[in-house]
Amino acid sequence: MSKKGVLLVNLGSPDSTEVKDVRKYLDEFLMDERVIDIPYWKRFLLIKGIILNTRPKKSAAAYKKIWWKEGSPLVVISERFTKKIKDKLDIPVALGMRYGSMSMENALAELDSQGVTDVFLVPLYPHYAMSSFETVVVKAEELLENQFGHMKMDVLQPFYKHPDYIRVMSQFLKKQLEGFDYDQLLFSYHGIPERHIYKSDPTKSHCKIDGTCCEISSEAHKTCYRHQCFETTKAIVKELGIDKSKYRNSFQSRLLKDPWLRPYTDYELERMADEGIRKLAVITPAFVSDCLETLEEIAMEGKQEFLERGGDEFIHIPCLNEDDAWVEVMKQWIIDWKKG
């Protein structure tokens, strides 16, 4: 007899804002070959020899700015979301993180202890990227093969333009913008290196990052992060009837000196202020849970950049987090999977 269960997976977080804990977390995160996809020896020298000697202190200071009394915002929000899902379902639900001590291994062991044999893996990422969705799926497959061989797994595919997701995102955004007569709405997505786009292209020829390939139908779009981000924006602005002159896209959180997806969010913030935009709203649809990249990089650093450049008003739109409508959507997706 099979028994179904759900594994929700988010990014992860350091255990604390102490430099040693941040270093440990960054070590696991950045050594992932799908995050920094260079030969192992180069990655080892770069991460162990340079980054982990400089970045943890700076990152720890950033985490301290956004850390909650209960702990890491991303972890706390994910736990609250998971509890709400559990309360609405009659099957086991576990939460794991791709990196950090709240591991996917522990989450699968929790499901195993409850007799689960059929797992519904839910990567909490709307879009496909090798450094987010793909690494979660690969890690889960490895764990099942090596430790939980009696389990089988289905995966929730990227939901970047699923009608339910677009509806709940649009309704949430509309509510958050009530009373704010913005000049511009910026969709800021997490950035990835351009080479990841080419590596994820199964055709090895479609993706050009030239402004046209995302508009030409291709099987490459199933694994193209850039295309999927633009599709999310298009679907939301269509749902809300936002004029094309009132919004734009950008990409944040670049690392190292390689070319990353453009335009860069920090450059766009300065450019918009220089253009005379005075009231700006920023939404971060690549995340379903607020985290360092949204709470510190956008809501604090981004706001400061925009206002110091001459902007007057700046609001950061929170992620869906534990919004009840979002919980209902996820609950229904799980029920649909359970029904087969």
Image (tube, rainbow, N blue to C red):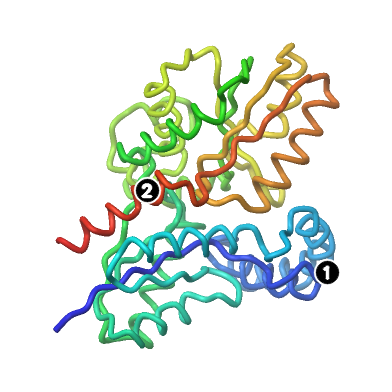
* Badge 2: residue crowd in 10 Å (few <14, some 14–19, many ≥20): many
Q: Earlier in the sequence, mark 1 or mark 2?
A: 1
Tag 1: amino acid: Asn
x and y, in percent, of residue 104 in the image: 47, 75
Query: Which quadrant of the figure contains the N terminus?
Result: bottom left
x and y, in percent, of residue 180 in the image: 62, 20
x and y, in percent, of residue 286 in the image: 51, 44
Dot 2 falls on a residue whose secondary structure is helix
The residue singled out by tag 2 in the image is: 223
> Closest to the observer: 203 or 188?
188
Dot 1 falls on a residue whose secondary structure is helix
Disc ID at residue 131: none
Tag 2: amino acid: Thr
Q: Residue at x 39, y 78 (%)?
A: 142
Query: Which quadrant of the figure contains the C terminus?
Result: bottom left
User: In 3D space, how far apart are the residues under numbered discs 1 and 2 (Cα atoms)?
Assistant: 34 Å
Q: Residue at x 37, y 35 (%)?
A: 166
Q: Residue at x 47, y 26 (%)?
A: 211
Asked whether the beta carbons under mark 1 and mark 2 sit within 8 Å of each other, the answer is no
x and y, in percent, of residue 148 in the image: 33, 85
Disc ID at residue 53: 1
Quarter location, residue 15 = bottom right
Relative to 309, residue 101 above or below: below
Q: Residue at x 59, y 27 (%)?
A: 186
Horizontally, is 213 left or right of 120 in the view? right
In this figure, what is the number of numbered marks? 2
